[in-house]
Image (tube, rainbow, N blue to C red):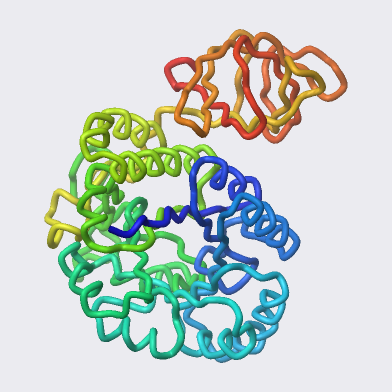
């Protein structure tokens, strides 16, 4: 049985380092162009260099997405982009467009190429096609069942790797190829600018009565007819292992460090427990469920893995996320051994009870004893996002730990 890679997204250098600390084997990131998350903060070339160096020092890998469906006027710039990436040296490029594939193969031949799910990879002949062109890995379409993935594994060369999304948001369109955003907002989802119209609220309008909007009631807030539940396979790791998948991919290049740390840590432990002892994995199931439910999500589904989803895979009454914690920041070394420094993300107060989230799975309750700004001034609360603060807690926090606050303690 193959030991799968845990592949985790990162929206920034800070989140990349968090993913590595909290259990990722590899991290995928986007540059400032040519990836499908144009509205993410993404990585400058300098941040890429630092992030790749950090990951490599820990024995981990970094993949860079360049998976837009390119138009003619994208190609010249893409060649320049690949030239720079060839010097920076990520472990792989994630590409969907054949033209982008040929350019990357020509300009940076020493970097592995992975074929994005955007390329609609849903049969073993497609996998063989990309392998013959030189791809090292192909990402399965999200429309595939575990049985179909196992069939692909049986019909492709052993050295060709399979990567599959196992957790995160689902798209309403076939392998993410959507035109809704382009039509409704003029922003092309296939070039990284999706406005997520599948999460919007819709009404009906009858042809002969223009301007008269008729609500389709699910509840008083309206109806969300395209709004899929989020994918979650934490309870089905043995089935994933049986399908012969090489890399378990987490969706979420727009997510913050708390989300990435929570999901990475939970899947890391679940995978390792299952490989060590199936009984151990089953015994710890309540912990996995509780941890996954503590970060933002839209309710969960198993997607297409066990057949075509039915109406229960959709959420009709809301487009909001469920969350149990507020993200406060990442601990850094303080001026002395009894203090830490954070760049504050959300408001909290002196005397609050918070949690220190550690990479090894522990969640340690802690009381905020004092808050001080960089000039040494005592503060009653921390109301200003991104402000550098010195904290003293009644429990030990180490550099890289995540600080979070249960919403019922906020």
Q: Residue at x 74, y 25 (%)?
A: 389
Residue 149 percent location from the top left of the image: 22, 68
Residue 240 percent location from the top left of the image: 25, 55
Instruction: Identify whether 281 is placed above or below 98.
Output: above
Residue 365 percent location from the top left of the image: 50, 15
Q: Looking at the rendering, which quadrant does residue 74 occupy?
A: bottom right
Q: Is residue 169 left or right of residue 384?
A: left
Q: Is residue 185 left or right of residue 288?
A: right
Q: Residue at x 51, y 22 (%)?
A: 405
Of residues 380 and 152, the one drawn nearer to the viewer in this rendering: 152
How many marks the image carries: the answer is 0
Is residue 392 visible in this depiction of the protein?
yes
* Quadrant for the N terminus in the image: bottom left
Q: Residue at x 34, y 45 (%)?
A: 271
Instruction: Identify whether 80 is placed above or below 165.
Output: below
Is residue 208 visible in this depiction of the protein?
no
């Amino acid at each position: 049985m193959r030991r799968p890679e845990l592949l985790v997204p990162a929206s920034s250098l800070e989140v990349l380092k968090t993913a590595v600390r909290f259990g990722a084997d590899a991290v995928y990131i986007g540059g400032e162009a040519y990836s499908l998350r144009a509205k993410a903060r993404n990585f400058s070339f300098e941040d890429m260099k630092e992030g790749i160096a950090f990951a490599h020092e820990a024995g981990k890998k970094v993949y860079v997405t360049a998976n837009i469906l390119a138009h003619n006027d994208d190609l010249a710039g893409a060649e320049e982009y690949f030239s720079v990436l060839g010097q920076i040296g990520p472990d792989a490029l994630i590409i969907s467009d054949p033209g982008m594939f040929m350019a990357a193969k020509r300009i940076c031949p020493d970097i592995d190429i992975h074929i994005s799910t955007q390329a609609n990879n849903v049969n073993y002949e497609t996998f063989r096609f990309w392998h013959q062109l030189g791809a090292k890995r192909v990402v399965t379409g999200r429309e595939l069942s575990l049985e179909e993935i196992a069939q692909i594994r049986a019909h492709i060369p052993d050295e060709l790797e399979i990567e599959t999304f196992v957790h995160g948001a689902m798209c309403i369109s076939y392998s993410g190829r959507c035109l809704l955003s382009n039509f409704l907002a003029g922003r092309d989802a296939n070039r990284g600018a999706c406005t997520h119209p599948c999460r919007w609220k819709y009404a009906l309008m009858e042809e002969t009565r223009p301007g008269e909007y008729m609500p389709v009631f699910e509840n008083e807030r309206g109806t969300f007819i395209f709004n899929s539940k989020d994918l979650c396979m934490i309870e089905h790791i043995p089935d994933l292992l049986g399908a012969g998948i090489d890399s378990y991919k987490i969706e979420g290049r727009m997510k913050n460090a708390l989300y990435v740390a929570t999901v990475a840590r939970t899947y890391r432990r679940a995978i390792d427990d299952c490989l060590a002892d199936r009984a151990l994995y089953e015994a710890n199931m309540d912990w996995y469920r509780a941890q996954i439910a503590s970060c933002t999500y839209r309710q969960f589904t198993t997607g297409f893995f066990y057949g075509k989803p039915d109406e229960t895979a959709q959420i009709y009454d809301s487009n909001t996320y469920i969350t149990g914690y507020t993200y406060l920041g990442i601990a850094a070394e303080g001026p002395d051994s009894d203090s830490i420094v954070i760049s504050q993300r959300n408001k909290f107060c002196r005397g609050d009870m918070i949690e220190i989230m550690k990479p090894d799975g522990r969640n340690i309750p802690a009381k905020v004893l004092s808050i001080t700004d960089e000039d040494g001034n005592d503060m009653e609360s921390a109301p200003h996002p991104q402000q550098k603060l010195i904290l003293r807690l009644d429990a030990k926090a180490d550099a890289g730990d995540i600080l979070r606050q249960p919403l019922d303690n906020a």
